[in-house]
Image (cartoon, grey):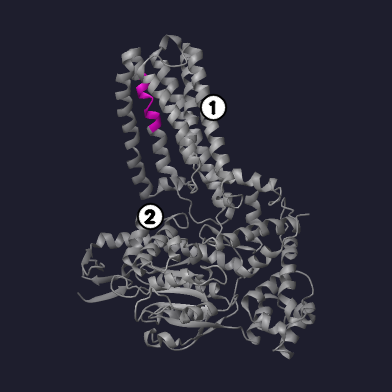
Amino acid sequence: MSRSTVWGSLYQVDSGGGDVTLQHEGNGDIIVALPQQHEALLGWAQTLASSVRRQEADVRDRLLADAGDPEAADLEFHRTELDLVRWRDDEKSGDGSLSTIAAFYTGLRRGRLVVLGNAGAGKTVLVMQLLLDLIDSQKQEPTERGRLVPVRLSLPSFEDSRLASPDMAPATVAKLLDDWIVRQISSGAHPLKRRHARELVRAGWVLPILDGLDEMDPEGADPTRALAVIRALNTHGHHGPQPIVVTCRADLYRRLEQSSSPAMRPGEVPVLQDAAVVSLLPLDIDRVRQHLAYRFPGRSPDGKVADRWRPIDEHLTNHPDSPLARLLCSPLWLFVTVATYLNHGKPEELTRLPEGGLRDFLLARLLPESVAQHQYSGTGYSESEVRQWLGTLARHLAMARQQGRSGADFYPHQLWRVAGGYMPRIVSMVLQGVLTALFLLFALSHYHATTSYWIPPYAPGRALLLAGLLLVIWVIARAGRSAARLRGLDTSLLRTPSGRRRMLFALVWPVAGLTVGYAFGIWFSQGYGPRVGQAYGLSFVSVGLVLATEIVLARRPSAVSQPSRLMGQALAFQAVVLTCYGLAFSAGFGAANLAAYPWLSWTAFGDGAVLGLWLGLAIGIGRTCDSAWTLYAIAVPILIAHRRFPRRRLGPFLDWAYDAGLFRLSGIAVQFRHHALQDWIGRDTRPIA
């Protein structure tokens, strides 16, 4: 064996005939992964890296709000010494900036990094740049040497109520954290199966970038949840501390450093061990001026900023310690200022405002400027409409945070939570239960019209009637579930090896339908004769065909480019499944009736087709009654009726706010551009005009 390299919990050894992976388990055992298993890990890692790269690049460009070549101001950071863990840091010295963050990180011995900064200091932008640079640099490495895929995760969405208990063992929290990471990278954010995501996490091929440690606990409360996560991250993995990146506000991290918990063991510390800790520095005046000159270049060849921004440039030069200068040294407020005066307005007025009024003045101007700058054809949102809906969403997130859930992440398919905890679910249960019962009643009425029986005279028919009643109960129970399933359709799977494997697996269902149908046909023929029984028994194949179609085409929605795409995929899935069940049962029952009564010709086919259509629609509702689209469609009218949402479609509005830079995407979650904007809008309670 000529060489070995380490990534996470994997030792990859070049044995001449292909890499052999030696994986350390928690009990000290070593499992040898064969070359083909290593190749599978590489394929999944490449799929994940491509998805992460595409998504994060788009989010970063929108955060910078630049239509040209987006470029952030070059943030600087310096090493921070923590007295509590000075003996357990990463022994990495030196400072850096946004352009050198990847080189700084790859120089760490253990790959453990904490990024500190004040609110709006640019922590998220820095770790985004780190993620993109790491993925781009790994593209230059030979694929057989492995890949450590960085994935940015919103830590506030780690919503386990058990984290609030100080008695939770760190190893247990570490297991919960790993399970959450697996769900995050396989439950819609990226096109990866959960089994494959689990293998990547278990093998140590995922570098979690945990963004927002400071937002896990309610404002002002003890950082119980944050401390639980830190203790879990200090728990050794398979063979040592796992690589990790964490962002946190500096004041909260200092509180963690000084905190204590009766559950902590002797020698245990409440901050990340074996890690390098860096603090983001405010932008200096020269970097602010350079950024303004880049965003608003002047027409003259002297390289200065545009005439509209020259008063600001001169103010920064002559008064570097003024309230405005200190404010613009924050990346967040530099962005807000640029966005507010992007196309028109006089930035000079900012030089005359007192320090206490600058932030509120800029935020108050941001909404009308965003509305004015992003008036697309057919939208026409007014400022009052934008303010009303954003306020509803911001107050909902604030309430969610007080309840121990994420106060930063909003999922469109969970809109029903904004409309109330019970009303959307009750309406969904009643509506879908009534629809299912109506479809079954139509089928029964049609059966009565053709046979004069309300209750079938033979046992198989009565068994089907009982199954219909159980179906109604099943629909009501599933429609009331709080966790709506988010599924979509993806025809591109048919062109992939994974999709073809799913097609082979899906063939099991038509075969199962044929088997069940043949057995039912024998039972059914006891009352109606062999020909009738076998004909209707064969109609069970239609059930298998629809289930096979679902298996091949259905999938969890992948990362979306617009918030509305999420619900669009859910709606498409529900519509296609309902249509497939209706048509399949209609064709199956029509063909069965024609085979059973050939002398009636098309009359027999029509009677069977109508009966099958109603049954198929009823069963289709049963298959999709827990779809995210149903609760979504119910919640919107409730919000409109309570004047908490403008009388417009929600999807296009979310897309508009995303394009305007008021929202950002994290996987499939929607977030406010920054919690300062979210808090300010949440306090604005003016009624809609």
Q: Please report the residue visible at 44 percent of the width from the left and 43 percent of the height from the top.
A: 553
Q: Nearer the viewer, residue 631 or 42?
A: 631
Q: Amino acid at mark 1?
A: Leu
116 or 507, nearer to the observer: 116
- Image height of 69 relative to 392, above or below: below
Residue at x 75%, y 86% (from the top left corner): 315
Mark 1, other Cα within 10 Å: few <14 / some 14–19 / many ≥20: some
In the image, 280 versus 410, the foreground residue is: 410
Quadrant of the rendered image containing residue 32: bottom left
Q: As drawn, which residue projects farthest toward the front?
A: 262
Is residue 310 visible in this depiction of the protein? no
Where does the image place residue 249, in percent across and percent down from the top left?
A: 54, 76
Mark 2 nearby-residue class (10 Å; few <14, some 14–19, many ≥20)? some
Q: Is residue 567 left or right of residue 159?
A: right
- Report the residue marked by disc 2: 194
Which residue is at a point 36% across and 49% down the rendered structure image?
498
Q: Is residue 161 left or right of residue 349?
A: left
302 left or right, relative to 548:
right
Q: Nearer the viewer, mark 2 or mark 1?
A: 1
Can you give x and y, in whole percent of width and height, for residue 278 in the image? 49, 82
State the quadrant of the C terminus. Answer: bottom right
Outermost residue on the bottom side: it is: 318
Helix, strand or loop at disc 2?
helix
Q: Which residue is mark 1?
A: 438
Q: For the N terminus, which image quadrant?
A: bottom left
Relative horizontal placement of residue 201, taking residue 315 as reference (left or right): left
Magenta extent: 535-543
Callout 2 amino acid: Arg
At mark 1, the secondary structure is: helix
